[in-house]
Image (spheres, rainbow, N blue to C red):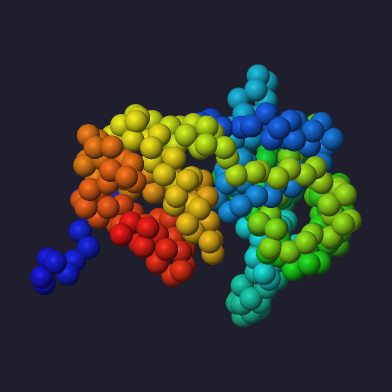
Amino acid sequence: MDKSNRIEIEAPRIGSLASRAPAEDYILDPDLANAVKVALLLGQPLLITGEPGTGKTKLADKVAADLAAMPGSDFLPSPLRFDAKTGSAATDLFYTYDALAHFHAAGARRESQGPSPEALEFVSLQALGKAIALTLPPGDARRELLGKDQPKAAHSSVVIIDEVDKAPRDFPNDILGEIENYAFSIREAKGEFSLRRDPARKIFVLLTSNSEKNLPDAFLRRCVFYHIPFPSPEKLLAIAKSHLGQSPIGERNLEAAVRLFIDKLRAICQRKKPATAEMVAWLRLLELHPFFKDNPLAPAQLSDQAKAALRLSLPALAKNVDDMKALQEFLR
């Protein structure tokens, strides 16, 4: 095959595109940190809004890591995650039940004249259900739903419900009581089978929303709210440095790249403005071009070689045809 018709990337360069900023490098604004403290003190969920890519989901990693690092803490260091979807039901946040597998197993047991399988054998706990079960003390039979790899001790945990606005409108209202009481029942089980949080442990629920649709007022009243604004130039530079560290494009060019992103590239995109996540991905692509290390990254001084390198990085920024065309025109 003609090599000119292949996509070839050296293996070491692929690795350089991976995220290098752990949870502790998340830059937490004082106002956002205060919102987290308020939600913890009140024992209420924290609802976070903001542009896609501004770090809403990553906040859960930061909060879980910080809570786990506190002296005497029993918090798990990583959050339990639930991704809301257009077809999500309230029970999905707590558990799923494989009815088809149960049906087939019951048929096989009948043929072998064995005892009918219990519904609980086909129940899998999901994010908030796991969090509640993890608070139960060792020896509690209900912890068996966690599976063989359950921790030996009881734990507090952080739960993130990501993009809750994607779920059906009834979803937030349907989980009000369960989130307030941290309790749920498994309807498919024989008799009464319920799990409730052990009061000695805590569960911190973080919800994110892209504001694609309004959430019910009854739900909002039970949440602490914070909107993450788009970062200032100073914070964007700090975010870039936390993710890239000693970047091979040089500190001067890193500052120039962030300024170019804010003043030109982000402003040019009208349909979907690139956010922090896109900026970090774009900067990582620039790292692959050693040309920028010894040459100024300024629009008025860009050579044809620099423009060609920048043009290759545009797919990290533009998310639709109109914005791509506008960015290409700018580089011309």
Q: Quadrant of the C terminus?
A: bottom left
Q: Quadrant of the N terminus?
A: bottom left
Front-most of 144 and 274? 274
Residue 141 in view in this figure? no
* Residue 159 falls in image quadrant: top right
Residue plotted at (88% across, 49% down): 221
Which x, y percent locates residue 60? 62, 41
Residue 87 in view in this figure? yes
Q: Is residue 156 above or below residue 127?
A: above
Which x, y percent locates residue 9? 22, 54
Q: Farthest residue to the front: give it.
A: 300
Q: Is residue 183 above or below residue 169?
A: above
Residue plotted at (60% across, 44% down): 230
Front-most of 158 and 111? 158
Left/right of residue 253 with respect to residue 28 in the rendered view: left
Which x, y percent locates residue 301? 28, 43
Left/right of residue 48 with respect to residue 26 in the rendered view: right
Which x, y percent locates residue 108? 60, 77
Residue plotted at (38% across, 31% down): 245
